[in-house]
Image (tube, grey):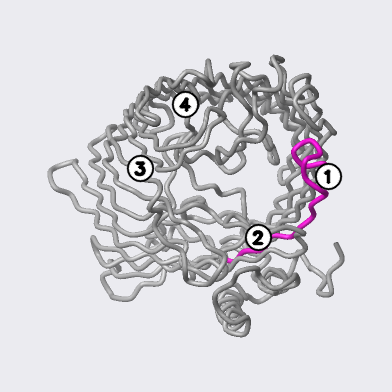
Amino acid sequence: MASRHPFDPTNPSSFLAMAGRRSGSLRRGAEKPFARRLCWRGCLTGIAAIAVSAPAAWAQAPASVGGPGITIERYSEDWSVLADPRRRTGRWTEPFKYLPLNDAGDLYLTTGLEARTRYESYQHGQWGQQPRNDYLWNRVMPYADLHMGQLRVFAQPIISDISGADRVETPVDTTGVDFLQGFVGLEMEIASGTTLDLAAGRRLRSLGGGRLVDTRYGVNVPLAFDGADVSLTRGTRRITALGLRPVENRVGDFDDRSSDQKALWGLYGTQWLAQDRRTGVDLYWLGFRDRNAVYDQGSGRQTVHSFGMRWFGVEGGWRWNVEGVIQRGEFNDARTAAWGVGGEIRHRFATAPLSPEVVMMIDYISGDDDPDDPELNTFNALFPRGRYFVAQSPIGPRNLIHLQPSVTLRPRDDLDVTLMGAAYWRESTRDGVYSIPGALVRSGRGSDARYIGTQIELSATWRATQELELAVSAGALGAGPFIRESGSSQTVFLASAMATFKY
């Protein structure tokens, strides 16, 4: 897709200009005049551009920052460590990460930004049920985090857009200009070694490995939640109580609202097995209500309770994350009984040539045993990761057996090249295939075959600078017997390219 404004990866301002401009057709169904939306985008994008502009000489600063690593949620980063001059490296971003507002240093401001452009191309989407689809996602997300002793106020707007798509725009494509996050938090020590954290408002949330509650970070508009949570932390233990509603993103400006259809509540506990918190066990109960859940069996009101356990850790070159969930509840006044187990284990051979990392992912997730029986056995993945398996998989974690090996090579310290393969089966041959958000992609009533298909993907990620990352991927999803016997079965071809500037 040609651009009238060439993108210079060494120039953050050119990237922001491309991310902020509107190059497609007018947004369908927008509630505000285009000129007003454009004004908001221009103002916020201009602020973001000013925030990241820096003299060219700064690019020669040290490659490491003395503060924490960059996270998806951003509010979990603690940049107060830069109050100590010995922790500073001279990186050009450091003056934006810790701005003291009083002599004591307990009143300070942290700022930052993410600007991302992502191109995606699908040919024969849903095995030929959809026409070719090429589009460009753009988003800019600046933030400000004001700390006032034990109290903090966090705010993060989002400017999002899609261009080139020959389809109706959806809430994951764009939400115009809106508030992605905005909350008030309080952290205080209530007893020796015991900390209480309170947060109320709108924010991104991810629990554990993100299999049931995650930020939906891969698509253009992340998923935020409105509500409150409270955490108690003592030593190597933490327990969190939460009551949340997902935010319903709408394509107009400043019109996102809490969902009336879905709600989430529960308790989530973690026991770390070491002081460095790299290894531990999670135990949780999550309650979920959906007034209009949709399955191959039908649609209706569902209440489901998820009881889960997760074991995670890092030891030498090994990393692992294993999780199991049992679900009980009601669907249209009938019983819900579902389950899911899955995990990943990885090992990096750091001293071998190209530092290869080998990963194996496995999922075994229940489907409905009988669509004519009122009891529902399809697992409800609640709010899973936006890219659950390979980067552009159209298949989601319901009624699924999934096996995915991959290998990542590192030709140089700033470049990763990954080859992934994935195989998909239906756990129950009486149930259908679902997308990542949970929509029914293909009914299971047209075939008794189990195998869905095979996917392969090659991707590369280059960390051009500490703030700029460039990534590309290409893959194909071939149809197995179930897809061939139940409808159109063309091979799906997928491609993407992405540039992310973040500090």
Q: Residue at x 41, y 67 (%)?
A: 155
> Mark 4 or mark 1, which is nearer the start of the sequence?
1
Residue 51 painted magenta: no
- Tell us which disc is closer to us: 3 or 2: 2
Q: Quadrant of residue 81?
A: bottom left
> Mark 3 or mark 4, which is nearer the start of the sequence?
3
Label 3 SS: strand
State the residue in front, 289 or 345: 289
Alpha-carbon neighbours of circle 1 within 10 Å: few (<14), some, or many (≥20)? some
Q: Quadrant of residue 182?
A: bottom left
Can residue 478 be seen here? yes
Type of amino acid at the residue the image marks with label 3:
Leu
The residue tagged 4 is 313
Q: Residue at x 81, y 35 (%)?
A: 476
Q: Could you say where residue 15 lies in the image, as x and y percent from the top left?
A: 71, 68
Q: Are marks 1 and 2 in contact (CB under 8 Å)?
A: no
Quarter of the C terminus within the rendering: bottom right
Q: CA distance from mark 3 to mark 2?
A: 27 Å
Please give the range of residues in magenta. 124-140
- In this view, 173 is above or below 452: below
Can residue 274 be seen here? no
Q: CA distance from mark 1 to mark 2?
A: 18 Å
The residue tagged 2 is 169
> Mark 1 or mark 3, which is nearer the start of the sequence?
1
Type of amino acid at the residue the image marks with label 1:
Gln
State the residue in front, 399 or 62: 399
The residue tagged 3 is 264
The residue tagged 1 is 123
Type of amino acid at the residue the image marks with label 2:
Glu
Q: CA distance from mark 4 to mark 3?
A: 27 Å
Type of amino acid at the residue the image marks with label 4:
Gly
Question: What residue occupies the far right of the structure in this picture?
Answer: 2
